[in-house]
């Protein structure tokens, strides 16, 4: 008996195509297409492929599939690029493109997968205009069986060779009192199955639920990954139990079952039952409300907190004084900076007081960041500035109330801007200082 029986509406594995030059088929692939002596198990991954074929042409773009929503069957398109190929039939070259799918049948028996609509484009050549196509595959019937020994299990059977289950409980020590809470979390990881088929995890809740506890479950976290065509799924269920009244609550033991296809064995992981005893506040022979009160000697001492507060106050006090001193130093350095001295020169020039201008000029000239052109041995390079400074000196010596302050300020401002645009001129000495002084002496003698 073949592992899969294909019953198509028109013909066995026949195409359902609207054009003669294009064919679309849904067929098994890999081991599912071979005769292994048994039908595939319900819940087992069944590899399928949608095969597109175009005669004397090529495919353009990535095909799109509209997977049907069928009860009892889960279809999943793997995140893998289509596989291209070609074949020759009766002298006609067919270009093929295979899209990898996977199917999981939930129950044993015969199941029919409805037609899958495929939207794609073809062209006669790489430079030809694409022609959109919309075709449907023929229905595909699959026959599956239940693994031996699993007939009594309810729900969709998990079929995977790599499964891990973990349960984490965090709870206070029994007995509990109203207001106590415990947290539980369970995680299941499996391969060759999508996360939507993983069973619910966690302890089985008693029915009816006792009034001693309240259940606050979290939404399940489902994750499916498909690295290089392999499926990896995980599911996490968590929740919080809050004690609301006295009573005894017992959560029955539970288990996770799965079929291992590699070992052909039914595997299980069981978890023991959990019993919670909730006592009324202020009563109980073994542990009363008074006995639950902590011993005064167990109270954390306040001295560490007081000492920490004292140390913090000292640090803030010392830091405040250091910050104030640093702020004063910053203001002093800023006041003694070159921009501050130049502002003093600007104010003095606006007052037209020769003595104030001379003091501000000498103060600015003495700063290391002042332009080199303001130095006494470089004034001759700016005739207007040299003449203005000569008039300023005469006004200071003669106690004249007027001088050419506007020219002094304009020349100093221009010199400062030139130095700012060419900062290298501040530190580079003249190429030939001797020749400069000699040339100036010669020009003076000629004058």
Image (cartoon, rainbow, N blue to C red):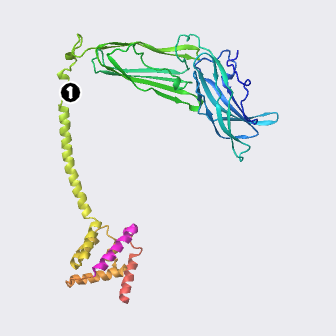
Q: Position of residue 241 (x, y in %)?
A: 35, 21
For image coordinates 21% across by 57% down, the residue present is 328
Q: Is 307 displayed left or right of 115 in the figure?
A: left
Q: Secondary structure at mark 1?
A: loop
Please identify the quarter of the rendering in which residue 392 is found.
Answer: bottom left
For image coordinates 21% across by 78% down, the residue present is 355
- Judge by depth and name the residue closer to the eye, 293 or 385: 293
Numbered disc total: 1
Please identify the quarter of the rendering in which residue 446 is found.
Answer: bottom left
Looking at the image, residue 376 lies above or below residue 336: below
Looking at the image, residue 2 lies above or below residue 98: above
Please identify the quarter of the rendering in which residue 148 is found.
Answer: top right
Q: Is residue 366 visible?
A: no
Q: Verify whether residue 414 appears in magenta.
A: yes
> Dividing the image into 4 quarters, which one contains the C terminus?
bottom left
Residue segment shown in magenta? 404-426
Q: Verify whether residue 74 appears in magenta.
A: no
Q: Position of residue 330 (x, y in %)?
A: 25, 58
Q: Is 251 displayed left or right of 34 in the figure?
A: left
Q: Position of residue 156 (x, y in %)?
A: 54, 18
- Judge by depth and name the residue closer to the eye, 44 or 280: 280
Q: Residue furthest right?
A: 90
> Dividing the image into 4 quarters, which one contains the N terminus?
top right
Kindly identify which residue carries mark 1: 300
Callout 1: 10 Å neighbours few (<14), some, many (20+)? Answer: few
Q: Is residue 139 visible?
A: yes
Q: Is 152 displayed left or right of 176 in the figure?
A: right
For image coordinates 24% across by 78% down, the residue present is 352
- Judge by depth and name the residue closer to the eye, 28 or 395: 28
Instruction: Give the prevailing secondary structure in the magenta stretch.
Output: helix
For image coordinates 66% across by 30% down, the residue present is 50
Q: Position of residue 351 (x, y in %)?
A: 23, 76
């Amino acid at each position: 008996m073949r592992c899969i029986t294909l019953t198509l509406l028109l013909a066995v594995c026949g195409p359902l195509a609207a054009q003669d030059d294009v064919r679309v088929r849904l067929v098994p692939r890999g081991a599912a297409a071979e005769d292994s002596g048994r039908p595939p198990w319900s819940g087992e991954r069944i590899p399928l492929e949608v095969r597109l074929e175009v005669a004397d042409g090529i495919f353009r773009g990535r095909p799109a599939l509209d997977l049907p929503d069928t009860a009892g069957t889960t279809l999943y398109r793997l995140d893998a690029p289509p596989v291209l190929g070609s074949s020759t039939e009766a002298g006609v070259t067919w270009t093929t493109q295979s899209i990898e799918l996977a199917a999981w049948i939930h129950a044993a028996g015969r199941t029919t997968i409805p037609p899958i609509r495929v939207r794609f484009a073809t062209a006669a050549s790489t430079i030809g205009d694409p022609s959109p196509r919309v075709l449907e595959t023929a229905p595909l019937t699959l026959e599956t069986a239940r693994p031996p020994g699993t007939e009594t299990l309810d729900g969709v059977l998990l079929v995977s060779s790599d499964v891990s289950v973990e349960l984490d409980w965090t709870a206070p020590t029994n007995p509990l009192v109203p207001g106590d809470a415990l947290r539980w979390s369970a995680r299941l990881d499996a391969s060759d199955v999508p996360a939507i088929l993983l069973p619910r995890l966690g302890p089985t809740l008693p029915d009816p639920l006792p009034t001693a506890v309240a259940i606050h479950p979290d939404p399940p976290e489902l994750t499916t990954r498909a690295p290089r065509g392999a499926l990896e799924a995980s599911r996490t269920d968590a929740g919080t139990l809050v004690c609301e009244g006295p009573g005894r609550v017992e959560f029955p033991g539970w288990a996770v079952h799965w079929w291992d296809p590699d070992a052909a064995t039914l595997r299980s992981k069981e978890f023991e039952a959990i019993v919670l005893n909730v006592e009324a506040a202020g009563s109980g022979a073994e542990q009363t409300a008074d006995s639950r009160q902590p011993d005064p000697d167990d109270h954390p001492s306040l001295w560490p907190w007081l000492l920490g507060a004292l140390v913090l106050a000292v640090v803030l006090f010392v830091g405040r004084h250091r910050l104030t001193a640093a702020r004063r130093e910053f203001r002093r350095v800023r006041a003694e900076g070159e921009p501050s001295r130049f502002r003093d020169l600007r104010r003095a020039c606006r007052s037209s007081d020769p003595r104030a201008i001379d003091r501000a000029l000498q103060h600015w000239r003495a700063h290391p960041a002042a332009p080199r052109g303001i130095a006494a041995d470089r004034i001759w390079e700016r005739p207007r500035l040299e003449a203005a400074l000569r008039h300023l000196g005469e006004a200071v010596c003669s106690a004249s109330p007027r001088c050419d302050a506007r020219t002094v300020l304009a020349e100093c401002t221009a010199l400062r801007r030139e130095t700012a645009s060419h900062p290298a001129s501040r530190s580079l000495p003249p190429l030939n200082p001797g020749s400069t002084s000699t040339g100036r002496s010669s020009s003076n003698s000629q004058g």
